[in-house]
Amino acid sequence: MNPPDPREEWMQQYADGTASAETTSRLEAALHADAEFRALFLEYLNLDGALSEAAASMTGQPVEKVTPFPSAHAWHRWAWAMAASVALAALIGALVFLPQASASPAVLLRQALKIHAASPDRCYRVEIKLAPALQEKQREPSSSETRLWTRGDRCWIETRAGEKSVAWGHDEQRRVWFALAPETGVLFQPDEARERMAQARSVMSQFFAARGMKPPFDFAKCFDRLALACELCSLQVESLLHALLDDFDLRREPGAAGGTLIHAELKAGHTHPLYREVLLEVDAQSGVLRRLVVHRLHDGQPAATVTFTLVETSVQADSSYTLAGHLAPEAVIYDRQSGMGKRGPLLAEFLHLLWGESVTD
């Protein structure tokens, strides 16, 4: 049985306000020496929001607030103690500023994971560059602008092409949806597209062949394009960061303008269905991911380099992550039951807006 770690008692005494000068000195030395312990201490106290507030008061600069401190009275007692002690002020400096300067890339990603799970919604501009092999079969997206809003592992996307725009995404049940207009929404169940590819092609081919006609849409091609669009444009921050921590080798280097770059490459012997390599730019002050360059895979092959650049931070309504949140009250939603014969043309129109080419044979 492992002996108890004395640092646990130091943390508890410090949080309770009962730590002696000697205990505080030992705690401070441990925090300066161990980046992993600094991250653990921040999590133990749940002081992210309070520390941001303290940093703002000391520097005069606004710092993004991450999580609320659970007890205002406890925070005030702690703040008075900090103000009365030079050692505690030094300790705050170590907690707020040293982790970014000396922490391992894994510590920075765990901090980013916590921040993105707890703080406001973020909007990223999406830019896609297809891999050469995929360019032979698929032209580059034609949209003039694509923006993605993300909250944890939820996201919704707005794509504009000229005068037209479409909101689309996937909800917590992994259903893919899009709203071409406020009056019309389309919904696909998880894995419905892949399940129906072969069936749709077979049925449609037989139907039109019997009449000596050509099918108006290649449904298998439609569903494959839909799956590709979802894979390339979606950003599930929590799942991505967990994957990087588990299956990727991480290294860090200084970034420009107060940022830290983290390079993530698959470990030897590890595989991942979506990511081959990722570059993350972490804001040195807030810990927020302000840019991600993701080398995507599709069917196990290099598909595209997708760059997500942070452009806005604000609070979005919960409904914005659902199809209903982008439709008028009287809108019609076409799903598996109600969309027979109607979702195909709407899907083709949606994909034409994204890719700028027809999906007809």
Image (cartoon, rainbow, N blue to C red):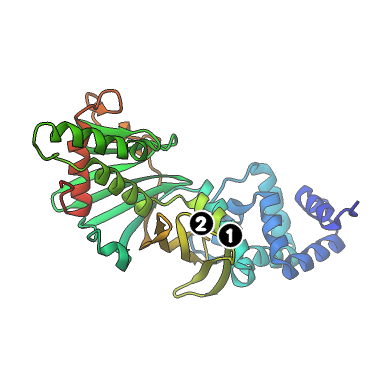
The image position of residue 358, as x and y in percent, is 15, 49
**Residue drawn at the location 9% of the way across and 32% of the way down:** 211
Is residue 159 rendered to the left or right of residue 298? left
The image position of residue 304, as x and y in percent, is 35, 62
Q: Is residue 322 visible?
A: yes
Front position in the image: 211 or 93 = 211
**Residue drawn at the location 29% of the way across and 23% of the way down:** 337
Residue 272: mark: 2
Front position in the image: 55 or 207 = 207
Is residue 61 rendered to the left or right of residue 215? right
Amino acid type at circle 1 is Asp
Front position in the image: 16 or 342 = 342
Amino acid type at circle 2 is His
**Residue drawn at the location 35% of the way across and 51% of the way down:** 148
Residue 259: mark: none
Residue placed under numbered mark 1 in the picture: 247
Name which quarter of the figure residue 329 lies in: top left
SS class, disc 2: loop
**Residue drawn at the location 57% of the way across and 61% of the way down:** 270
Is the C-beta separation of discs 2 and 1 under 8 Å? yes
Is residue 303 rendered to the left or right of residue 32? left
Is residue 239 rendered to the left or right of residue 294? right
Give me the C-alpha separation between circle 2 and circle 1.
Answer: 8 Å
SS class, disc 1: helix
Front position in the image: 67 or 58 = 67
The image position of residue 331, as x and y in percent, is 22, 27
Q: Nearer the viewer, mark 2 or mark 1?
A: 2
Q: Is residue 181 visible?
A: no
Mark 2, other Cα within 10 Å: few <14 / some 14–19 / many ≥20: some
* Mark 2 or mark 1: whose residue is earlier in sequence: 1
The image position of residue 97, as x and y in percent, is 61, 67
